[in-house]
Image: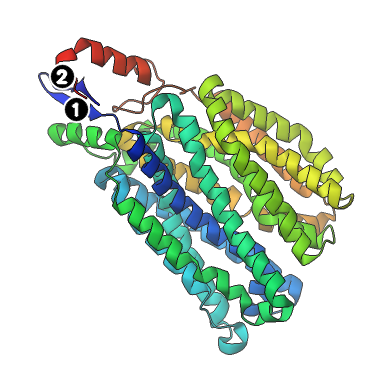
Amino acid sequence: MSYVQPSTKQGEQTHFHAPSRGPIRRAMAASAIGNATEWFDYGIYSYGLTYISAALFPGSTAQATLFALATFAISFLVRPLGGLFWGPLGDRLGRKHVLALTIIIMSVATLLVGLLPSYASIGIWAPASLIALRMIQGFSTGGEYGGAATFMAEYAPDHKRGFCGSFLEFGTLAGFSLGAFLMLGCSVLLGNDAMHAWGWRLPFLVAAPLGLIGLYLRSKMEDTPVFRECAEVAEREHHAGVPLRELFANYWKPLLQLGGLVVALNVVNYVLLAYMPTFMKKELGMSDNLSLFLPLLGMLSMMVLLPFAGALSDRIGRKKVWWLSLVGIFVAAVPMFTLMSHGIAGALIGLAVLGLLYVPQLASISAMFPAMFPTQARYAGMAIAYNVSTSIFGGTAPMVTDWLIGRTGSTLVPAYYMMAACAVGAVALLFVTETVGCSLRGRGIPGEKGTPSGTRREEAVHEALPEHRHA
C-alpha cells in the first residue's frame, strides 16, 4: 500500500510505501542476524575466557584472566569511534550499505581470533594481535547495533514496533547462546587438555558462515521506507544527514537520556550474561561446565519471554515496562545474589528472577531508542550515545566487578553495581518522552508536540488524499 505525504515544499508530495509482511519479516531476520553475529563473539569469548587467557596471555591464571577481561573491555573503548564514523555515514548513505560492511568486518575479526598463534609460539605478539582484532571488532560493532535497531524500527509498523524490535534482542541472546553452547559442547566432548591445546579455537571459526548469511540477507533488502522518504525530501531541499556539531547542539537532551538508559541496560546485561560464568566459577566455586550451563538456562528462558514483553510495551508503553524492570532489579539484586551463594538451586533461582526482571528492558530498547531521534539524525544519534555509554559502563562491567570483588571480598559487589546503574537509568527515564504508537517518519522527533502519531498520521493522509491511494 502507498500513502502520499505532503512535502515541506509547496506543491510537492512524497510517496510512503508501507511494507508488507514479507519485507518486514526479512528486515527482522536481516537485523537480528547481525546482532547474533556480534553477540556470538561475546558468547564464545566470555565462555572460553579460561582457555583464551591461558593460550594467549602470560602470567598466573589470575593475572591472565584479568588481562583477558581487560582485553574484552578494550574493544568497547573503540566503539564510540565506530559510532562517530558509521552513524553519520548511515544517515547519509542509508542503513543497508553500512550494515553490510559492519557485519563482514565483525565476522572476519572474530574468525581471525580463532587462528591466532599462542603466547608460547609468538610471545607478546599473541595478546597484541588479540587486542588489535578486538579493537577492529569494537569499531565495526560501533555501527552495528545502532544501525540494526534503526533498520528494524523504521521497517516495523508503528503499533507493533515493540513486538518486532524484540526479535533483534532475540538475536542477541540467540547469538550469545550459540557461542556459549558451542564452547560448552567443545569442552564436554574434547576435554580440558584438548580445549587448552586447540579446541577453544573451533567456535571462533563459525563466525565466517554467520557473517556470510547476514551479508546475504542484508544485501537482498531495500533500505527502510522511512529513510527513503526522508532522503527524497532531503534531495529536493538540499539537506541530508545532520553534521556532528549540529547533532550535539540540537539533540543533546536525547543523547544524554539515551546514555543514561544504556548505563542501566548494559551494566545489568554484561554482569548477567558476560561475567556470570567467571563469577560462578571463581566466587561460588562451581565447576567449569556448571558455571557455563546455568547462565545458559537463564538466557534460553529470557529468549522465550522477549516477544511477549515487546508486545506488552506496545500495549502499555515503553516507559512503564522500563519502570517495572528498573525498580524490580533494584529491589531484587541483593536478595538474589545472596541466594546464589546457597548452592545450585539458589544460583538458578537468583539468575532466573534477575533475568525475568531484565527482559522488559531488553525487549523494548529496539523500539524505544531509535524513536528518540528524527530520521536524519537517528542512526548517528543512536550509535554515538549508545556506544559511548556502553564503552564506559557496559564492556568494563565484568572487569570492574571482578576487580571490586578482589578488593572488597564481597560477592554482593555485582548486586550493588547493578543497583547503582538502575538508579542512573531511573533518573534518565524521568525525562524521556513516551513514543509508543508514534510514527518515525519525517524530520521531527517522534512524540514531540506537532509530531502526529503513526496511526493517526497515516489515517489523516489516507482520508485527505484518497485519489493518491493505491493497493
Image quarter where the C terminus lies is: top left
Decide: few, some or many residues near mark 2? Use Cα within 10 Å; few <14, some 14-19, many ≥20.
few
Kind of residue indicated by mark 2: His
The numbered dot on residue 427 is none
Q: Name the residue located 39 percent from the left edge and 33 percent from the top edge.
A: 156
Kind of residue indicated by mark 1: His
Cα separation, mark 1 vs mark 2, equals: 9 Å
Q: Name the residue located 35 percent from the left edge and 57 percent from the top edge.
A: 215
Q: Name the residue located 87 percent from the left edge and 50 percent from the top edge.
A: 341
Nearer to me, 430 or 407: 430
Decide: few, some or many residues near mark 1? Use Cα within 10 Å; few <14, some 14-19, many ≥20.
some
| Residue 107 lies in quadrant | bottom left
For label 2, the SS is: helix
| Residue 239 lies in quadrant | top left
- In this figure, which residue is indicated by the disc labeled 2? 468
Residue 317, image x, y percentages: 53, 22
Q: Is residue 271 left or right of residue 342?
A: left
For label 1, the SS is: strand
- In this figure, which residue is indicated by the disc labeled 1? 15
Q: Name the residue located 46 percent from the left edge and 62 percent from the top edge.
A: 137
- Dot 1 or dot 2: first in sequence order is 1
Residue 161, image x, y percentages: 45, 30
Q: Using the rendered image of the protein, determine whether residue 318 is visible from the camera's viewpoint.
A: no
Q: Is residue 242 left or right of residue 133?
A: left
Q: Is residue 277 left or right of residue 21?
A: right
* Residue located farthest toward the bottom when viewing the structure as drawn: 121
Image quarter where the N terminus lies is: top left
